Image (spheres, rainbow, N blue to C red):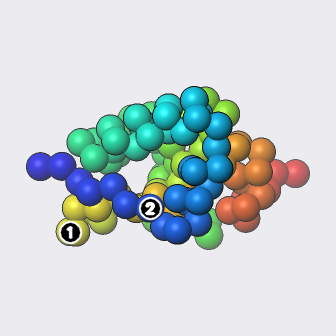
Amino acid sequence: MSYRVRFDPVAERALLDLAKDARQRIIARLQALAHDPRPSTTQPLVGNLKGLRKLRVGAYRVAYRVDDEARTVTISEIGHRGKFYQKTGRGRG
């Protein structure tokens, strides 16, 4: 049984702002989450982002939450790796 992938408004705007090729690569990876919401290529996040998982797509990062009961994957944040960590409050250094 597959999951439904949905977007928070902020994540949807971020996706639409990306270049077409990056957007297409990310969408393909997000569609795969509907069949396997926790692939081995993702990692659980910690600290103030606990409960979210991180998906790497080239230089971009996607933060998302899995709700097994509702069978949904909610995309919370999408961004370039440098700005992604600043936006999510996990800035380095």
Q: Amino acid at mark 1?
A: Glu
Q: Where is residue 49 shown, x and y percent of the image?
A: 58, 65
Which residue is depicted at the point 58% across and 66% down?
A: 10
In this view, the mark in front (1 or 2): 2
Q: Which mark is residue 7?
A: 2
Q: Give the quarter of the image for residue 30.
A: top left
Q: Identify residue for label 1.
A: 69
Which residue is depicted at the point 52% across and 59% down?
A: 12
Which residue is depicted at the point 50% across and 32% down?
A: 25
Q: How many marks?
A: 2
Q: Where is residue 80 shown, x and y percent of the image?
A: 70, 43
The residue at the far left in this view is 1
Viewer-proximal residue among 23 and 73:
23
Q: Is residue 77 left or right of residue 42?
A: right
Q: Is residue 63 above or below residue 60?
A: below
Q: Amino acid at mark 2?
A: Phe
Whether label 1 touches label 2, CB < 8 Å = no
Q: Is residue 40 left or right of residue 82?
A: left
* Secondary structure at numbered mark 1: loop
Viewer-proximal residue among 2 and 69:
2
Q: Residues within 10 Å of mark 2 (few under 14, many from 20)?
A: some
Does any portion of residue 49 appear in the rendered image? no
Viewer-proximal residue among 69 and 8:
8
Q: Which mark is residue 28?
A: none
Viewer-proximal residue among 9 and 53:
9
